[in-house]
Image (cartoon, helix red, strand yellow):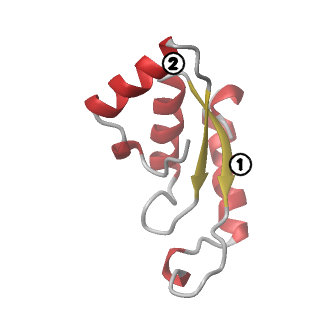
Amino acid sequence: MHSNHPREFDEEINSDLDRLKSAGALFFNQTVLLRSVNDTVEVLRELFLSLVNHRILPYYLHQLDRVEGAAHFEVFKEEGLELMQELAKILPSYALP
C-alpha cells in the first residue's frame, strides 16, 4: 500500500481495507516524505499510528526521487533523518518504518 498523509483514510477506504484484512490480506505501507505534505513529526506520527491502528505496518519512509517538476516536494536527507530520530523517541518500534 502507499499512503502519505493520515487524511487519505476515510470511512469507505477503512471499510474496504477491513474486508480485505478479514479475507487474510496483510498490509505494509510505503510513505514518501514530501515537503509541506508530511514533513513534520506531528503528521508522520498521526499517519503511522493510524496505520498501526488499522493493522497496517509502516514499512518504508522514502526520500523523494529527484524527478523534473517535483523539486518543491523534496525534503533533504538530513531533515528526514532528524524526523526519524524524533519519531523514534515518541513511537513504539512497530509503528516506525
Q: Residue at x 40, y 43 (%)?
A: 6
Residue at the spot x=46%, y=47% of the render? 42
Q: Earlier in the sequence, mark 2 or mark 1?
A: 2
Rendered residue at 54%/21% (across/down): 55
Tag 2 and tag 1, C-beta contact below 8 Å:
no
Going by the numbered disc 1, the residue's amino acid type is Gln
Q: Is residue 12 left or right of residue 45?
A: left
C-alpha span from label 2 to label 1: 31 Å
What's under tag 2, amino acid-wise? Answer: Lys
Compared with 2, 51 (above or below) is above
Instruction: Count neighbours of disc 2 (C-alpha within 10 A) and say few if under 14, some if 14 to 19, many if 20 or more.
Output: some
Q: Is 84 above or below relative to 46?
A: below
The percent position of residue 32, horizontal first and vertical second, equals 58, 58
Number of marks in the rendered image: 2
Crowding around mark 1 (Cα neighbors within 10 Å: few <14, some 14 to 19, many 20+) is: few
Front in this rendered view, residue 14 or 6: 14
Q: Is residue 69 left or right of residue 9?
A: right
Instruction: Find residue 18 and name its label.
Output: none
Against 93, is 75 above or below? below
Residue nearer the viewer, 54 or 93: 54
The residue singled out by tag 1 in the image is 85
Q: Residue furthest front?
A: 23
- The residue pinned by badge 2 equals 21
Residue 3: % across, % down = 49, 47
Mark 2 falls on what kind of element? helix
